[in-house]
Image: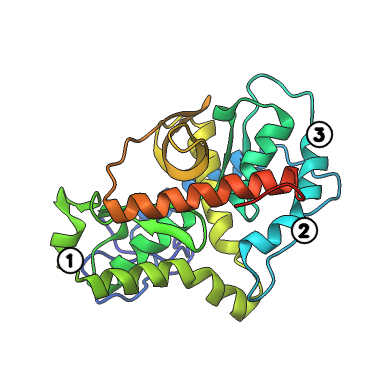
Amino acid sequence: MRRRGHGSSGCGVPYRHPGSDGGIQGCEQRVHCYHHRWRKAEEGRYVESIHKDTGGRHFKNKKKSETREALLQRNVRILSSIAKSILPVKDDTLVLLVANPVDILTQLFQEISGIPRERVFGSGTFLDTMRLRTELSMRYNIAATHIHTYIVGMHGDLQIPLWGVGNVASVPVEEFFRLTEKDKKAIGDAARDKAYKIISAKGSTYYGIGACVAKLSAGFTQNRHQIYQLSTWHPQYGCYLSWPAVVSKKGVSGIVPVALTVKETEIVKKAAATIRFGVKNALNPKKSKL
């Protein structure tokens, strides 16, 4: 196979070569370029096919140092008006929420619209999970595509990496990377706080979440039956929660039964309680108590 540089045959999409010193390189192989071109075109086509109707109403961006919960009250009225205005919808309609606090807003949208739970979902901790895998990849020079670990809970300060169930080539993540408690905290904090650093630097996180929306949209519309970390209904906790779920053209077809440690369970329960309170407070702000 002939090598290609960044000339007319290069796709310009950066990638990390497995086993490299961690530097970002351009695409070098012709077939790789064709793959990237096809992928970009296909995902773009599917994203463009998704109907987006906010009637000129836009969710407010998160301000610097503002919590996602504080953002809720600024966005809930907009969400309600959008949810009511799109009805009625076809039976095969899928709704993907990409606004913060995403877990709370996703449940609110489902309750207001009445669209079946399996067809309403949010971006959840999908981007956070990608950031976690990228952080591990950059620190230890292992391709992120071979790192299988997840972040669950409530997107934001109550999200938690599941170190105990992650693996690299079937070897537990903790064992493969020889992670100490200090390492896990530093890596988890880096993944969680990445959004705040990006917002502080340039005002918003458009590109990261945009790439996630493209991938999620293609996963649903192409009926891939892949597992993504979405904000979806979790019957055990009685609310929407960011959790690994199987997706298809019919929506969320099931959640992954993940085994949690005692500490992880405590954080997830706290996240679920916060989400339930947020939903209740948004619907009845004067009557809610956490």
Residue furthest to the right in view is 56
| Amino acid under disc 3 | Lys
| Amino acid under disc 2 | Arg
In the rendered structure, the answer to whether residue 223 lies left or right of residue 141 reads: right
For the N terminus, the image quarter is bottom left
Q: Secondary structure at mark 1?
A: helix
Residue assigned mark 2: 74
Q: Position of residue 244 (x, y in %)?
A: 40, 42
State if disc 1 and disc 3 touch (CB < 8 Å).
no
The image's mark for residue 210 is none
Q: Residues within 10 Å of mark 1 (few under 14, many from 20)?
A: some
The image's mark for residue 84 is 3
Residue 208 seen anywhere in this rendered image of the structure: yes
Q: Position of residue 289 (x, y in %)?
A: 64, 51
Q: Residue at x 71, y 64 (%)?
A: 61
- Which of the marked residues, 1 or 2, is nearer the chain's N terminus? 2
Residue furthest to the bottom in view is 201
Q: For residue 178, which quarter of the picture?
A: bottom left
